[in-house]
Image: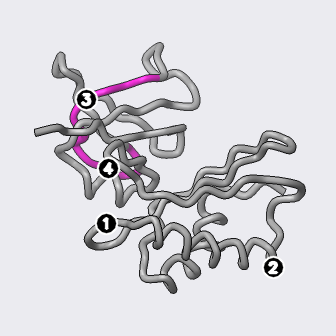
Amino acid sequence: MEMDAAAWRALLEPAVAAMGCELVGVEYHPRGRHSLLRVYIDREGGVTVDDCAAVSEQISGVLDVEDPIHGQYSLEVSSPGLDRPLFTAADFVRFAGHDVRVRLRLPQAGRRRFAGRLLGCEDGEVRVRDAAGELFRLPLADIEEARLVPEYD
């Protein structure tokens, strides 16, 4: 059974919250014996290696009991980093005003990749204005991956 983003969040968020962290998002990449479960966490003041290790141990216990992945897999727990991935509508609202890169599952307007200023998310659509000033309304459900573009001072 393939779990969607909401199911992963429901399964793992209580364990992450119990460790004093925020669950930013979950990526699952099924690849036979080399499957990967990547969990992004954050907390006020940033995430340490010790935080990642503690959350990894907590999540491993949940995964052992619930057994959502059959077979071997690797578990990675990390901070979202400077190129923070965006997963939820709330993420797209929270980071409005920042530059983003978005990749869609299926092409829209003849393309799958978009980059520009994030204007937010309303009614299930993420709004991005590119460098030429064109506004794109991208269905949140069709977004394969979205990340902030790191800003260096």
Q: In which quadrant will I find the N terminus?
A: bottom right
Gap between marks 3 and 1 measured at Cα: 26 Å
Q: Is residue 37 above or below residue 111?
A: below
Give the residue type that dot 4 points to: Cys
Toward the front, the furthest residue is 50
Give the residue type that dot 1 points to: Gly
- Residue that numbered label 4 is attached to: 121
Disc nearest the viewer among 4 and 1: 1
- Check if residue 118 falls in the magenta segment: yes
Residue 90: horizontal and vertical position, in percent?
A: 35, 60
- Residue that numbered label 1 is attached to: 46
The residue stretch that appears in magenta: 113-125
Disc nearest the viewer among 3 and 1: 1
Q: How many numbered marks are there?
A: 4
- Residue that numbered label 2 is attached to: 65
Q: Earlier in the sequence, mark 4 or mark 3?
A: 3
- Element carrying mark 2: helix
Disc nearest the viewer among 2 and 1: 1
**Do residues under tags 4 and 1 come within 8 Å of each other at their CB atoms?**
no
Q: Residue at x 22, y 48 (%)?
A: 96
Toward the top, the furthest residue is 110
Left or right: 6, with 41 as reference point: right
Gap between marks 3 and 2 measured at Cα: 42 Å
Q: Earlier in the sequence, mark 4 or mark 2?
A: 2
Left or right: 51, with 132 as reference point: right
- Element carrying mark 4: strand
Q: In which quadrant will I find the C terminus?
A: top left
Q: Residue at x 38, y 44 (%)?
A: 125
Give the residue type that dot 2 points to: Val
**Do residues under tags 4 and 3 come within 8 Å of each other at their CB atoms?**
no
- Residue that numbered label 3 is attached to: 116
